[in-house]
Amino acid sequence: TIEAVIFDLDGVITDTAEYHYIAWKQLGQELGIPFDKEFNEQLKGISRMQSLERILQLGGQDQSYSQAEKADFARRKNEHYVSLLDSLTPEHTYPGIRELLLELRSAGIPAVIASASKNAPQILRALGLESLFQYVVHPDSVAHGKPAPDLFLRGAVEVGAEASRCIGIEDAQAGIQAIKAAGMIAIGIGEENVLKPAGADVVMKDTGGVNLSFLEETLQAFGC
Ligand code: G6P
Ligand code: MG
């Protein structure tokens, strides 16, 4: 049986991965570093400052700014991003997610958030989902971000679950790698050609079909 389901947030619970993309793209344009969705895949799942470093590297500008300037860029991106969050309502929850969380609650299976985002609590509040998660891992509480397993392992420990009996759900390559490094079953949400190479056990186009019986079948098929 499943002991916990550990969810990424952005791009799994709601479409905030798109908001991150919009806000980074805007900053990139201001710095003269244009990039596309394919490059953006690398930014998913990693921290704010790491994302900025990747963008500056792409533009060959990683040595061009002081720490204070970089902090200011990250602050500007976050202000833009947070302004986009203003429009979030419970209707922006991805298909099937609330229903799945209710099924998990009825079955007594803990649901956990393992996101790199410092904005996670605000987003869960805006979606009206806070009470459906047993635990939200704080990104600053672990030594290493994704693709390291720390966030997922912490989530499992906090709810007393055995890693091999946990299912992780992710839309990012770094996130899928983190789940597999933690020894958990990985369900990818997105493109097969993006997430399979990262190690996803199963990839779904969207969250619509991800219900409890699907998760149980997946554990049966890929668990040990
Ligand atoms: C998630 C997203 C990333 C984002 C990171 C930090 O991992 O996938 O795109 O950069 O969180 O988010 P924050 O809201 O703290 O800037
Ligand atoms: Mg994500």
Image (cartoon, rainbow, N blue to C red):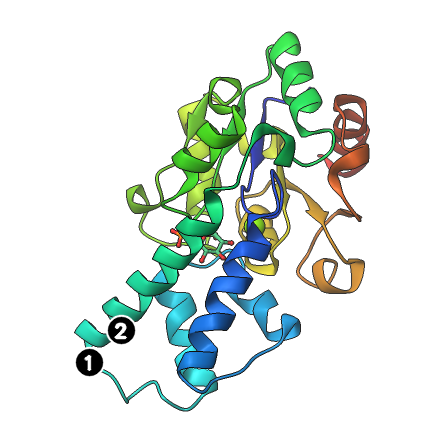
Task: Write down the quadrant of residue 46 in the picture.
Answer: bottom left
Q: Which mark is residue 66?
A: 1
Q: What percent of the width, then of the height, locates residue 159?
A: 45, 22
Whether residue 31 is situated above or below residue 26 in the rendered picture: below
> Residue placed at 66% from the left, 10% from the top?
107
What is the crowding at mark 1: few (fewer than 14 residues within 10 Å), some, or many (at least 20)?
few
Q: What percent of the width, then of the height, locates residue 210?
A: 76, 32
Amino acid type of the residue tagged 1 in the rendering: Ser
Q: What percent of the width, then of the height, locates residue 131?
A: 48, 17
What is the crowding at mark 2: few (fewer than 14 residues within 10 Å), some, or many (at least 20)?
some
Q: Are marks 1 and 2 in contact (CB under 8 Å)?
A: yes
Q: Quadrant of the N terminus?
A: top right
Q: What percent of the width, then of the height, locates residue 146?
A: 47, 55
> Residue placed at 60% from the left, 13% from the top?
105
Amino acid type of the residue tagged 2 in the rendering: Lys
Marks 1 and 2, how far apart in space?
A: 6 Å
> Residue placed at 34% from the left, 85% from the top?
62
Could you say which is closer to the camera, residue 124 or residue 158? Answer: 124
Report which residue position mark 2 lands on.
Answer: 70
